[in-house]
Amino acid sequence: MKQHTFNKVDYNIDVGNWDGACEHPETSRPTIYIKDTGQRIEDLITIFLHEGLHACKWTATEKKVDQTAKDLAGMLCKHFYIKRKSTKT
């Protein structure tokens, strides 16, 4: 399982067929759940950013986290031409 540190708290990162979620930072070894079902890369980046923002600022409202994640994902995809690699061979 992958890991990442947000604000000095180590999180497990579990990517699979989950609804996106971020466990409370005071949980013993909290986990961020990321749903990756082959959706558009901008949507996947939005989910990663959304849950990462919760980990960074647990008290932020869902509305603020959601809008910030969408804005950042849009900027990354638009200005850095991020595209999802095809999984077809």
Image: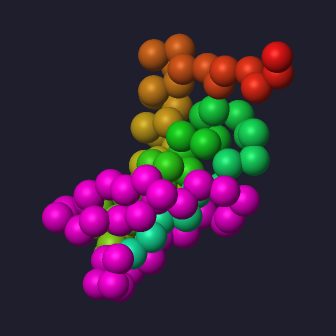
Q: Residue 1 appears at what percent x and percent y?
A: 48, 58
Residue 38, quarter of the rendered image: top right
Q: Residue 24 appears at what percent x and percent y?
A: 38, 80
Question: Considering only vertical position in the picture, is 26 above or below 62?
Answer: below
Question: Considering only vertical position in the picture, is 39 above or below 84?
Answer: below
Q: Residue 11 appears at what percent x and percent y?
A: 35, 65
Judging depth in this view, the residue of 47 and 10 nearest the camera is 10
Residue 7 magenta-highlighted:
yes
Report the number of discs: 0
The answer to whether residue 42 is left or right of residue 74 is: right
Question: Considering only vertical position in the picture, is 64 above or below 38?
Answer: below
What residue is at 45 percent from the left and 70 percent from the top? Answer: 31
Judging depth in this view, the residue of 39 and 75 nearest the camera is 39
Is residue 51 in sight in this rendering?
no
The answer to whether residue 8 is left or right of residue 34 is: left
Q: Residue 17 appears at what percent x and percent y?
A: 72, 59
| Quarter of the rendering occupied by the C terminus | top right
Q: Which residues are magenta?
A: 1-29
The answer to whether residue 50 is left or right of residue 17 is: left
Residue 75, quarter of the rendered image: top left
What residue is at 54 percent from the left and 45 percent from the top? Answer: 46
Is residue 68 in sight in this rendering?
yes
Which residue ends up furthest to the bottom in the rendered image? 27
